[in-house]
Amino acid sequence: MIQLILSDLDETLLNDNGSINKKNITAVQAFVNNGGYFVPNTGRSYKSVFGTLNELGLNKATQYVVSYNGGAIAAIEPDGGEKIIAQHGMTLELAEKIFTLGQVQSDVDTHIYTLDKLFIYNISPADKQYMQDRHVPYTELDSDDLSFLKDEAPIMKVIFEHHEPSVRERIGEVVTDNVGDDVLLTFSSDRYVEFNPKGVDKGSTGLELARILGISRDETAALGDSLNDAAQIKAAGVGVAVANAKPEIKAIADVILNTTNNEAAVADFIENYVGK
């Protein structure tokens, strides 16, 4: 019996425009009301998920979010209080190396996530719209000097945005050629190339939360679509690919849904697979 569902957000739970299908809301509420945990497992900051939690009706009891591709687990209370119950960050030195190596051309857009903030350098118009559609707060940087981060909360990850796959691949190659022993490389949303500290991913931290909640691997399911979801889909007792998932994700999934993120895939899984 599935007790914990770990779900990616963009292109999995959310529609392409960032909204949530009403069928997903109804199904998630029914699952939680029956004693289950529905936990966003996202590359984003946990703070950017508050609106999603409220829309899902997950603001009436302690709610959990796995964020930064496994960089942290946050517990969110009904009164808005928040507590970090696990974190796996990187050093400023490593973040600066990744940042510098990733500037392979002048139009690369770079995100630096700390535990509680998102900083974006050279943000592209498309990325600005993407952030706006998903109500993601950020601070725009006008300098490539990252020394100010020594006074900020721990750094979780560094990612780069570009519309050209070849540029994203080049960034991945340049960074891993230089600091590959220290980083985990993933790609997401057909726009981002992401770097977490080695050993940190959605799967390992998702199962860490399961252990905290006293839930076994076999009672855990994970839903996703993109390459940064591979770790959680492999780690969970039941790995689920939505219909719009990458071929690489479908190849490792236990369940491949016939519904896309725009067709309430999460509701499809809950209604037709959970408890069966």
Image: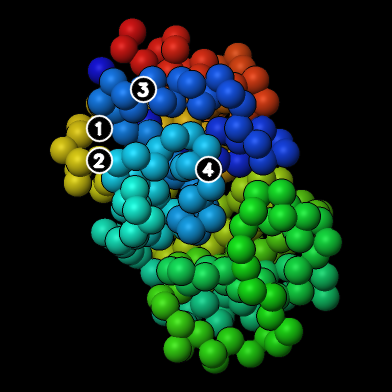
171 lies above or below 44: below
For label 1, the SS is helix
* Mark-to-mark CA distance, 3 and 4: 16 Å
* Mark-to-mark CA distance, 2 and 1: 7 Å
Q: Which mark is residue 31?
A: 3
Q: Residue at x 38, y 56 (%)?
A: 80
Question: In the displayed structure, does residue 211 sit left or right of residue 193?
Answer: left
Residue 187 or residue 19, whichever sits in front:
19
For label 3, the SS is helix
Q: Which mark is residue 119?
A: none
Residue 163 in the image: x percent, y percent?
Answer: 80, 54
Q: Give the quadrant of the C terminus.
A: top left
Which three-letter amino acid code belongs to the residue tagged 1?
Arg
Is residue 237 visible in the rendered structure shown here?
no
Q: Which residue is mark 1?
A: 217
Disc 3 + disc 1, Cβ < 8 Å? no
Is residue 31 visible in the rendered structure shown here?
yes
* Mark-to-mark CA distance, 3 and 1: 18 Å
**Disc 4 packing (10 Å; few <14; some 14–19; many ≥20):** many
Q: Nearer the viewer, mark 4 or mark 1?
A: 4
Disc 2 + disc 1, Cβ < 8 Å? yes
* Mark-to-mark CA distance, 2 and 3: 16 Å
Q: Residue at x 52, y 37 (%)?
A: 55
Which three-letter amino acid code belongs to the residue tagged 3?
Phe
Q: Colour scheme used in the picture?
A: rainbow
Q: Which mark is residue 52?
A: 4
67 lies above or below 20: below
Question: In the displayed structure, does residue 83 sit left or right of residue 257?
Answer: left
